[in-house]
Amino acid sequence: MNPFRKNLDNIISKIEKARIAFSRHQIVHLIAVSKYVNTNDIQTLYDCGQRAFGENKIQDFKTKADTLKELPLQWHMIGSVQENKINALLALKPALLHSLDSLKLAQAIEKRCARDNYNLKALLQINSSEEITKSGVKPQEAFQTYLKILNECPHIKLEGLMSIGAHTEEIKKIEQSFQITKDIFDKLSNYGAKTLSMGMSSDFEIAICYGANMVRIGSALFER
Ligand SMILES: *Cc1c(COP(=O)(O)O)cnc(C)c1O
């Protein structure tokens, strides 16, 4: 018995319900966050059909991607990137960097990408709940920062926004934090923003109500 098939089926049907309530035309991509699990578990979920995985530490990303290099997986980087790890990140050629969290980091990445003539797809991370423990650009600065990166960093292909919902049991506060990111995303749709990465195990259905079209789910997928 594949221990994760039931979890995956269950999550996919919840995503389906939520996305159809939002819009029949909304397509939601599921990124399986594998940061808590080993490569055996990743392969087990792969056997259920999952192809996109997310890691939050460059070293783990490298080790797991190396081990599983024969599988046609798509790897997403979802955790903070230190400037001294940029070369290591680019060498891994992530499908998407979700956690571009400052103009300064973008400028440092742009330098490396220009040198290597490499393009990196990325999302600008917004700290919509303004929690000090979270990284990301402040909502008030997000629009300008996004345009600045578009203008100054031609090797960074910005495709949208990422945000982590407010860390609370209060649904209202979680909704507020998603609404803030959604409003910025809508303003940026004229500038090519098309991906809105929001929602984790505890709040992905709410995030989809607020327009998320990419969810990052870890614990609920891999629980036994
Ligand atoms: C860990 C993590 C997730 C997944 O969290 P779960 O609650 O396990 O689903 C999603 N996004 C980011 C940025 C994370 O670090």
Image: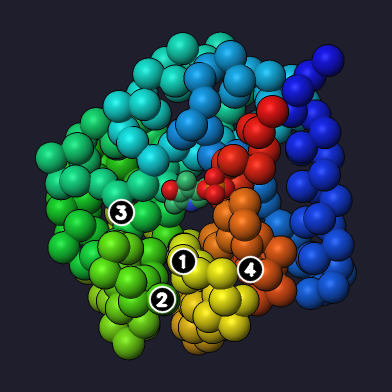
Q: Are marks 1 and 3 in contact (CB under 8 Å)?
A: no
The answer to whether marks 2 and 3 mark residues whose Cβ atoms lie closer than 8 Å is no
Q: Position of residue 9 (x, y in %)?
A: 83, 40
Q: Nearer the viewer, mark 4 or mark 2?
A: 2
Please tell me whether residue 140 is drawn above or below residue 63 in the rendered image.
below
State which quadrant residue 8 falls in.
Answer: top right
Instruction: Identify the residue at image location x=81%, y=55%.
Output: 14
Q: Nearer the viewer, residue 64 or 156?
A: 64
Residue 194 seen in this snapshot:
no
Q: Is residue 75 above or below residue 68?
A: below
Task: Looking at the image, tell me whether mark 4 or mark 2 is earlier in sequence order.
Answer: 2
The three-letter code of the residue at mark 1 reads His
Which residue matches tag 2? Answer: 129
Residue position marked by numbered label 4 in the rendering: 207
- Is 159 above or below relative to 30? below
Look at label 2 and name its amino acid: Ser
Q: Nearer the viewer, residue 21 or 76?
A: 21
Q: Secondary structure at mark 4?
A: helix
Mark before the other along the chain sequence, 1 or 3 = 3
Residue 55 in the image, given as x and y percentages of width and height: 44, 37
Q: Position of residue 29 (x, y in %)?
A: 67, 51
Q: Earlier in the sequence, mark 4 or mark 1?
A: 1
Residue carrying label 3: 155
Dots 4 and 2: beta carbons under 8 Å? no
Local secondary structure at mark 3? loop
Pointer 2 with pointer 1, Cβ within 8 A: yes
- Rendered image: mark on residue 167: 1
Looking at the rendering, which quadrant does residue 5 occupy?
top right
Can you see residue 116? Answer: yes
Around disc 2, counting alpha carbons within 10 Å, would you say few (fewer than 14), some (14 to 19), or many (20 or more)?
many
Mark 2 or 3 closer to N-term? 2
Question: Which label lies toward us, 1 or 3?
Answer: 1
